[in-house]
C-alpha cells in the first residue's frame, strides 16, 4: 500500500530583507539619479517617474519588516497566504536546491498570464516536497537554475 502523505506547511518571509551597507545606498542613488537625469534629458518622463517610484518602494521596504506568508500543500492543491490554487491550474513544478543561496520551489501555471510562483523552501526537506507533489503534478527535471529575477534580486540585494 502506498504511503499516505500528510499535508506540508511552513511560513516564509514575504521578501528577503537584505543587510545593505552605506555604500550600496550611495551606488544605487547615483545610478538612479543618473537614469532620472538621462530620462529627463531624452524627454522620457514616464521612465523617470518609474525610477522615482522604485526608489520610494526601496525606502518603504527598508523601514518595515516583511510579514510572514503561510504556505501549505495538501491533496487538493497549494495555499499561499490563504489563496488556493488547485492542481488543475498548475502545469508543473520544480525545485532548485543549491544551498545556501538557492532553496526554492517553483510552480508554473497552465495559463500564461499568471507568472511563475517561487516559494522559499526555508528548512523544508526538498525530497519530501518533491515526493508529495509528484503524486499530483509533473516535475520539470530540465530546470537546473533559479529564475533570473531571483538571481538579480539576490545579487543586487533588491
Image (cartoon, grey):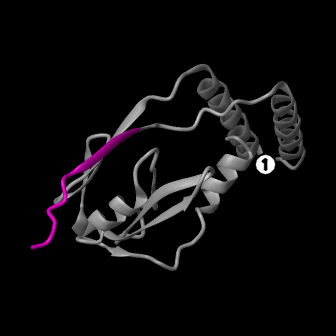
Q: Position of residue 153 (x, y in %)?
A: 66, 48
Which is more toward the observer, 19 or 81?
19
**Mostly what secondary structure, the magenta segment?**
loop
| Residue 104 sits inside the magenta stretch | no
Farthest left residue? 1
Left or right of 38: which side holds 56? left
Question: What residue do we see at 74% from left, 45% from top?
Answer: 156
In the displayed structure, would residue 36 be above or below residue 107? Answer: above
Query: Which residue is pictured at 88% across the width and 39% down the height?
Result: 37
Q: Find out whether residue 2 is within the magenta segment.
A: yes
The boundaries of the magenta stretch are 1-11
Query: Which residue corresponds to the image point at 83% horizontal and 25% vertical from the top-left?
Result: 22
Q: Is residue 71 visible?
A: no
Residue position marked by numbered label 1 in the rendering: 44
**Residue 97: where, in percent of width, then height?**
53, 60
Which quadrant, please, contains the C terminus? Answer: top right
Q: Residue furthest front?
A: 1
Task: Give the residue at the far top of this rendering.
Answer: 63
Tell me the quarter of the picture where residue 110 sits: bottom left
Whether residue 38 is visible, yes or no, is yes
What is the quadrant of the N terminus in the image? bottom left
Q: Position of residue 69 (x, y in %)?
A: 38, 37
Q: Residues within 10 Å of mark 1 (few under 14, many from 20)?
A: few
Q: Position of residue 94 (x, y in %)?
A: 44, 68
Q: Quadrant of residue 99?
A: bottom right
Above or below — where is 36 with respect to 137?
Answer: above
Residue at 80% over, 28% down:
21
Q: Is residue 46 above or below residue 116?
A: above
Amino acid at each position: 500500500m502506498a504511503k499516505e502523505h500528510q499535508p506540508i506547511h511552513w511560513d516564509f518571509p514575504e521578501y528577503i530583507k537584505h543587510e545593505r551597507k552605506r555604500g550600496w545606498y550611495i551606488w544605487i542613488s547615483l545610478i538612479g539619479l543618473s537614469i532620472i537625469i538621462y530620462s529627463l534629458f531624452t524627454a522620457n518622463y514616464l521612465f523617470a517617474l518609474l525610477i522615482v517610484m522604485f526608489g520610494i518602494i526601496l525606502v518603504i521596504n527598508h523601514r518595515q519588516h516583511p510579514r510572514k506568508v503561510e504556505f501549505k500543500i495538501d491533496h487538493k492543491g497549494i495555499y499561499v497566504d490563504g489563496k488556493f490554487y488547485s492542481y488543475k491550474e498548475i502545469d508543473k513544478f520544480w525545485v532548485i536546491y543549491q544551498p545556501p543561496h538557492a532553496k526554492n520551489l517553483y510552480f508554473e501555471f497552465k495559463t500564461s498570464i499568471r507568472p511563475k510562483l517561487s516559494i522559499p523552501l526555508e528548512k523544508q526537506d526538498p525530497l519530501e516536497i518533491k515526493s508529495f507533489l509528484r503524486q499530483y503534478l509533473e516535475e520539470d527535471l530540465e530546470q537546473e537554475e533559479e529564475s533570473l529575477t531571483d538571481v538579480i534580486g539576490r545579487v543586487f540585494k533588491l
